[in-house]
Image: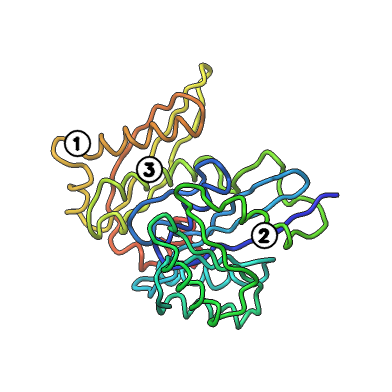
Amino acid sequence: MTKSAMITICGRPNVGKSTLTNALVGEKVAIVSNKPQTTRSRISAIVSRGDTQFVFLDTPGFHKPRTRLGDYMVNVVRESVADVDCVLLMVEPIAAIGPQEEALIDRLRESRSRALLVINKIDSVDKARLLEVMALYSTAYDFDAILPLSAKTGEGIGALFAELDRYAAEGPHLFPDDMISDQPERQICAELVREKLLLCLDKEIPHGTAVEVTRFSERDNGIIDLDVTIYCEKESHKGIIIGKKGAMLKKIGELARADIEKFMGARVFLQTWVKVKENWRDSMAQLKNFGFNA
């Protein structure tokens, strides 16, 4: 008898949603960085355990939008909280409920969603602080359970899966059992390049970038040719991304290629270009071109 469950992971930016998604899958399917709004679209991560398949929806961080891209990201979160079997609200071990958490709890009430509270980063606090956080959130919403864990170390992941079993309903699996993400390979490659932009660049520059794979082909000898265009919003940003004598772009390319080769299990010949598209984050046409159907 096969079973399946759809589970949304939501929370404020940088709370560890994508790190948890990768820990649940056991492989890197979502990019991570220490910068907010790293995740821009909803990513489906698939975990098949015996007869049960879990589909985790990793969502963008819930925040106050400043661009049309930001509006799109917030709408993705709001829509993802409804019509799923369970919502994981992920919070940090801080004994205060912030405005993002309050807004998400309000959305849970609106949609009457069944939810688990996941307190991440328990490796950074003592037990007394953790109990204080658990007590605070237990009065804020009728969570089915409150689960402390560390997405970074993996502590508590087994207990989370055990809790999630109750939401799995009898029926066919939604994806093939060997599938771990609904993202096409070229999209994952583009995201891995964007992850390195977030890693290597400072301040607002990486948030104004988009990455497009313009060629993805495999040679007879198994080498993958990958042409990637990086778009930014200002000519001055283009110069920073390229760097002195191309040094920054070379660094970004080398780091990205290493991760792409690991993901693809093949050698990769990566070529990168940088182009300017001014204010693309506020252009409905450009957002649609980049796959954000705002």
Q: Nearest the camera: 249 or 118? A: 118
Q: Earlier in the sequence, mark 2 or mark 1?
A: 2
Q: Is the Cβ of the residue at disc 2 closer than 8 Å to that at disc 1?
A: no
Note whether 146 is above or below 123 in the view shown: below
Residue at horizontal 52 percent and vertical 50 percent from the top: 155
Report the Cα–Cα distance between label 3 and label 2: 35 Å
Q: Is the Cβ of the residue at disc 3 closer than 8 Å to that at disc 2?
A: no
Label 3 or label 2, whichever lies nearer to me, is: 2
Outermost left residue? 244
Quadrant location of residue 65?
bottom left
Note whether 224 is above or below 142 in the view shown: above
SS category of the residue bearing label 2: helix
Outermost front residue? 128
Residue 186, image x, y percentages: 50, 41
Residue 163's mark? 2
Report the Cα–Cα distance between label 2 and label 1: 50 Å
Residue 91, image x, y percentages: 46, 67
Q: Amino acid at mark 3?
A: Val
SS category of the residue bearing label 3: helix
Q: Amino acid at mark 2?
A: Glu
Note whether 178 is above or below 83 in the view shown: above
Tag 3: Cα neighbours inside 10 Å, few (<14), some, or many (≥20)?
many
Where does label 1 land, which residue? 246
Outermost right residue? 1
Residue at horizontal 44 percent and vertical 34 percent from the top: 260
Q: Earlier in the sequence, mark 3 or mark 2?
A: 2
Where does label 3 land, which residue? 193
SS category of the residue bearing label 1: helix
